[in-house]
Image: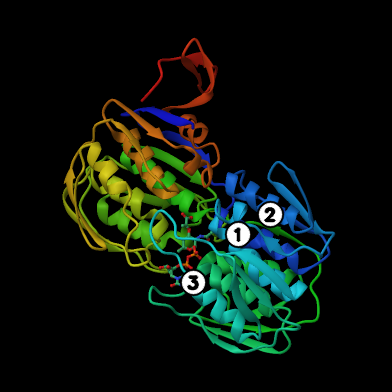
Amino acid sequence: MDAFSIHGGKRLTGTISVDGSKNASLPLLASSLLTDQTITFDSVPKLSDIENMGKLLAELGCDVSRDDQKVTITTVDESKSHARYDIVRTMRASVCVLGPLLAKRGEVRVSMPGGCAFGDRPIDLHLRGLEALGATIELDGGNIIAKADRLHGATIFLGGPFGSTVLGTANVMSAATLAKGRTIIESAACEPEITDLAILLNAMGAKISGAGTPRITIEGVEELGGAKHTVMPDRIVAGTWAIAAAMTNGDVEIERFPLDHLLAVTDVLSTVGVHVHQTNTSQDPRSCTVQVVSDRHLKPVMFTTQPFPGFPTDLQAQTMALLCLSRGNSIITEKIYPERFMHVPELSRMGAKLVRQGSTVIVQGVGHLVGAPVMASDLRASASLVLAGLAAEGETTVSRVYHLDRGYSSMEKTLSSIGADITRITDDVIVDGLPIVETVPPKKLVQANS
Ligand code: EPU
């Protein structure tokens, strides 16, 4: 398993650009199952989760090809509709194929996703929504089996104990495009990834209005056709780069920064004392350029994660790393995934002072962190450890980089391009007992890390 070796304390400066969004791409790619015509996507990030979705779609009868950031998908065989456990267990978002397969093929078998590193992640709301559209659903041998001759429109409430569900809204909205009659989703997720999906579905011929609000209306159509779509920039990657700049006394220009999608985050950053301002005149959230400047005189803050437009749970861990560098006590409350705190013990190994009580963590700002060997068991927790390593004194080794490869495309290359001292240690090639370390640029040999 690869690791990152980071020598902290380098100031990040320069310009980087944000890739297309992982969490938008996954349901977007899955919606190709709704038609037998070709869908072409631009700005699809190169990530292991996207590769897995491509493999799953190929198993489900799609012809999938990639040329750099462009992905083309055409369904050529509609006879298969089983999303196997082998793929679903590596990526929960495989559940995105449930709605499209049910609507187009009338039957779907998807392995039930289990919990994940940060707790239970039920899909009861997805299933309740599809049942309301007329599907019969049963569980057999760990698989969800959903069937329907033709779905019909319905009014569906998708709110749950932690707010609405993003992928549940994606599944029900996608399925309802081919249902007979009108569907209204109340308490729909308002995340920008849902709006992006509705833009594609409408380009394919669907009739969806209200996406991005808590009430989405879908007038069912008989069939959908081909389309072209450019994936929105990744708001979580953009926020991660902004926090990296903030933690390193940085001065970084970030292109394709979706400012409108990150207002809750830029608001917290400005309270902390980090300056984020737009440097171009674009009104389009897909093409803002912002400059992030920090002198690392950071103030404490209190924030709570919430559904969009609130503070995103996917930036909670990274922001906790930032607040460790402040002076004073911050309070972070996690309202989406109350158990999402795997980074807490690892940040503590780097000198952070953190006290967790239930779904709240009190961060006692310590002003600086020290390097250490650390590892985490999910994507965003791992990202927070990389950011902590960039700001820490000395060397930090972050193990299990495969978590980061799920959501950040060649993270080490992007960070190196703006001055970070970060190298990937690959352990697949060993020479004389030493791993070959891929540096950026050339390759050299170093001592094995723990
Ligand atoms: N929930 C239910 N029942 C359901 C579905 C969800 O109770 O049927 C609960 C969940 O347990 C959670 C809350 O509702 O407490 C929100 O979950 P949601 O369904 O919105 O999450 P998701 O759609 O499975 C997506 C992202 C996550 C992100 C969440 C919240 C993708 C592929 N995943 O997951 O991204 O944290 O929305 O914004 O879009 C990540 O990128 O690191 C990541 C975990």
**Observer-nearest of 216 and 445:** 445
**Observer-nearest of 76 and 191:** 76
User: Looking at mark 3, is its residue's CB closer than 8 Å to ligand 1?
Assistant: yes
Instruction: Name the secondary structure under disc 2.
Output: helix
**Observer-nearest of 344 and 141:** 141
Which amino acid lies under the numbered mark 2 shown in the image of this protein? Leu
Can you tell which mark lies on residue 56?
Answer: 2
Residue under the point 41% across and 49% down: 380
Q: Do the residues bearing badges 1 and 3 touch, measured as CB atoms within 8 Å? A: no
Q: Is residue 71 above or below residue 437?
A: below
291 lies left or right of 328: right
Q: Could you say where residue 392 lies in the image, as x and y percent from the top left?
A: 28, 32
Q: Do the residues bearing badges 1 and 2 touch, measured as CB atoms within 8 Å? A: yes
Which amino acid lies under the numbered mark 1 shown in the image of this protein? Ser
Q: Along the polypeptide, which appears first: circle 2 or circle 3? A: 2
Q: Could you say where residue 186 lies in the image, as x and y percent from the top left?
A: 51, 84
Q: Could you say where residue 306 lies in the image, as x and y percent from the top left?
A: 37, 68
- Disc 3 crowd rating (10 Å Cα; few below 14, some 14-19, many 20+) is many
Question: Can residue 278 be seen in this snapshot?
Answer: no
Distance, label 1 to label 3, CA atoms, is 15 Å
Residue under pointer 1: 94
Can you tell which mark lies on residue 249?
Answer: none
Residue under pointer 3: 165
